[in-house]
Amino acid sequence: MEHSVDESWDRILAWLAENAPDALARIGPPAAAAELAEAEAALGVALPAGLLAWWRRANGADRPWHGRPFDLLPGYCPVPIEMALDTRRILLEIAEADECDADEIAELEAQPAGSWCDTWLAPWMPIATSQGGQELFVDLRQGPLHGCVREYDKVGAAESAPRWTDVGAMLTDIAGALEQGTEISGLYAGHVEVTRDGSLCWRGPD
């Protein structure tokens, strides 16, 4: 099933404009062509159409700290391409410092997208952060789930199944949950909440 990034993103922006204008103001500007090219050059592969479409509308959000969370994605704040590339570089350096066997890494990178892995891999692109050691990333290995959205934890690595098949499916899910006030299970079950200071976050069930 195809999911329109532009349509879902417009729905998300419309909800924010009506319900959380302060949060809306934190959405980043569209990514420049040079930024998209830099990301593709770093990965050595073409970025999925859905991710490109999203970044062409909004290059992440402003810095997610300073006491004002912006969990547009349940439990995660979208990050700009520059921050995503920095995070990817750091995680690759950590994986290298762990002295992972090169043959094992090559075997893991040859596995289909969505496969379990206990270390960060080069074909993974971060798109959002929890600020607590978890990253939301797009798995760019080959296979039927190429471009799927997954979680990486600094302790458990990427052990869980993909949360979304692609960025388009993710944004469609988020748009529906915002509009209908429903829960999103998996990443962080709960309903969206706009706090008094304009922060956006998702609260788990009581």
Image: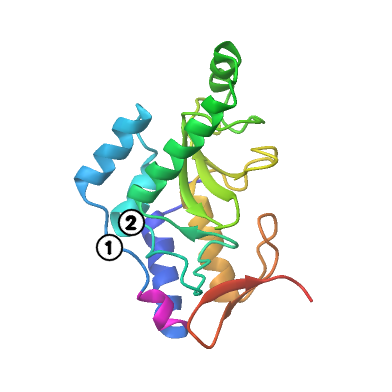
24 vs 88: above or below? below
Q: Mark 2 points at which residue?
A: 59
Question: Residue tagged by mark 1?
Answer: 29
Q: What element carries label 2?
A: loop
Residue pictured at 33% horizontal, 59% vertical: 58
The local secondary structure at tag 1 comes to: loop
Magenta range: 20-25
Q: Tell me the amino acid under the disc marked 1.
A: Pro
Q: In which quarter of the image is the C terminus?
A: bottom right
For this view, does 27 lie left or right of residue 154? left
Q: Where is residue 162 in the image (x, y as percent from the top left)?
A: 62, 42
Q: Is the magenta stretch mostly helix, strand or loop?
A: helix
Magenta stretch holds residue 83: no
Which amino acid type corresponds to the residue marked 2 in the rendered image? Answer: Asn
Measured Cα–Cα span from mark 2 to mark 1: 6 Å
Q: In this view, does 26 lie above or below 172?
A: below
**Relative height, residue 205 to residue 30 (above, below):** below
Residue occupying image coordinates x 27% and y 38%: 38
Residue farthest toward the top in the current orientation of the protein = 103
Q: Is residue 19 visible?
A: yes
For label 2, the crowd category at 10 Å Cα-Cα, with few meaning under 14, some 14 to 19 and many 20 or more, is many
Crowding near the residue tagged with mark 1, few <14, some 14–19, many ≥20 C-alpha atoms within 10 Å: some
Front one among 199 and 143: 199
The number of numbered badges drawn on the structure is 2
State the image quarter where residue 42 is shown. Answer: top left
Say which quarter of the image contains residue 47: top left
Please name the residue shown 32% across and 34% down the image: 40
Residue sitting nearer the eye, 189 or 159: 159
The answer to whether the residue labelled 2 contacts the one labelled 1, judged by CB atoms less than 8 Å apart, is yes
Q: Which of these two is toward me, 204 or 119? A: 119
The mark nearer the N terminus, 2 or 1, is 1
